Amino acid sequence: MRRALEHARAAGATGDVPVGAVVVGPEGEVLGEGGNVRERDGDPAGHAEVVALRAAASRVGSSRLDGCTLVVTLEPCPMCAGASMLARVERIVLGAWDDKLGACGSVWDVVRDRRATHRVEVVGGVLEEECATVLREFFGARR
């Protein structure tokens, strides 16, 4: 999570919402990582999770990330939760919960829906206060 926080802070420094993500392989190796790039790249899908999942898929040479863990500083939105499911990640470890758009248990629970063809384990609240503080400081400076 500390590595994901580094990416979150870097994204915030460029004007993007400070969210960072890291994909960890089954053996504990970092396969992909990144921060939000929506503003920087003008990409509506440029969320940290998508950036990290794409990098990991490229590294392993497959869209399937079986046995991998997605570590992210903020609870994934529906798009990112869906991308995680499609990538077949085993678990999502998240920092702060998102009570506005979270899709891993707070607003929705997309990744554990019983109708889904793949369900993802969710571990929440890891370094929660530190992750939430990065977001609060970012938005506090803009309001």
Image: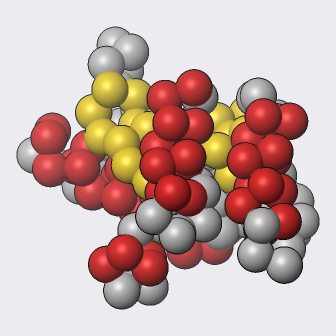
- Residue 40 percent across, percent down from the top left: 37, 75
Residue 53, compared with residue 131, is above or below; it is below
Q: Quadrant of the N terminus?
A: top right
Place of residue 94 in the rendered image (x, y in percent of width and height, measured from the top left): 68, 41
Q: Say which quadrant the C terminus sits in.
A: bottom right
| Rendering coords of residue 33 (x, y %) | 36, 42
Q: How many labels, in total? A: 0
Look at the picture and state if 41 lies above or below 63.
below
Nearest the eye: 68 or 40: 40
- Residue 92 in view in this figure: no
Which image quarter: residue 101? bottom right
Residue 12 located left or right of residue 133: left
Of 95 and 112, nearer the camera is 95
Residue at position x 15%, y 39% from top?
A: 60
Which residue sits at x=69%, y=52%? 74
The image quadrant that residue 17 belongs to is bottom right
Residue at 44% x, 85% y is 44
Residue 43 picture quarter: bottom left
